[in-house]
Image: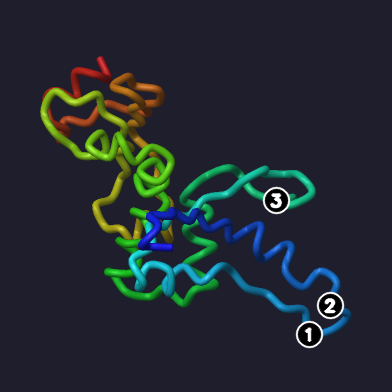
Amino acid sequence: MAAADVGVVVLPATDLYLMGRADERNARRGVAPLEALRRHGVRTAVSSNNVRNAFTPTGRADPLDIALLLARVSFVSDETDFAALLGLAGAAGAQILHPEAAHRHVVESGAAADLVVFDSVDPATVVIDQPGRHLVVARGRVVHGTERRETWAPELAGLMA
């Protein structure tokens, strides 16, 4: 898969819901082998699909919700794992869907930003506690903002005015 440059988006909520449904006892539960794929150089991401339908009847279409679910079922426990998981729930999916635009997922001056500002800088805290999103910018436009922060860079504070 890595040699063919195939990208895989893992859907843990769907995997867990569908796997083993017909088992009468000791129902199997599992998710796609994300770590094995990553170890072999396969481009990977984590997401959800079809929220609240026959394949995934629960969920909020929130990437952090899926990241936390995957952390629980994949034995994620250290800072490095949480940082990787946060990336898999963020820009990794966009890079798989639009590999020609991978450069757009780098923070740089003058770029049309796609970013989320959390009330934390710690990846484990972001995944586990899911702190509020103080600012969400999509294609350079603020689509959600809860408050003005004096500690933001002047350019970001100006977006909230």
Measured as percent of width and height from the top left, residue 56 is found at 71, 51
Q: Quadrant of residue 2?
A: bottom left
Q: Label 1 crowding class (10 Å Cα cut-off): few <14, some 14-19, many 20+?
A: few
SS at mark 3 in the image: loop
Screen quadrant of the N terminus: bottom left
User: Which amino acid does the dot numbered 2 rest on?
Assistant: Asp
Amino acid type assigned to the residue bearing label 1 in the image: Asn
Q: Which residue is most to the top?
A: 161
Of tags 1 and 2, the one toward the viewer is: 2
Q: CA distance from mark 2 to mark 3?
A: 21 Å
Residue assigned mark 1:
26
Amino acid marked by disc 3: Thr
Dot 1 and dot 2 residues touching (CB under 8 Å)? yes
Spatial CA span between label 1 and label 2: 7 Å
Does 56 sit left or right of 97 as displayed? Answer: right
Residue 109, placed above or below residue 39: above
**Mark 2 residue element:** loop
Residue under label 3, please give it.
58
Taking the spot 41% from the left edge, 57% from the top edge, the residue there is 44
Q: Name the mark on residue 77.
A: none
Residue at image coords 42%, 51%: 89
Mark 2 lies on residue: 23
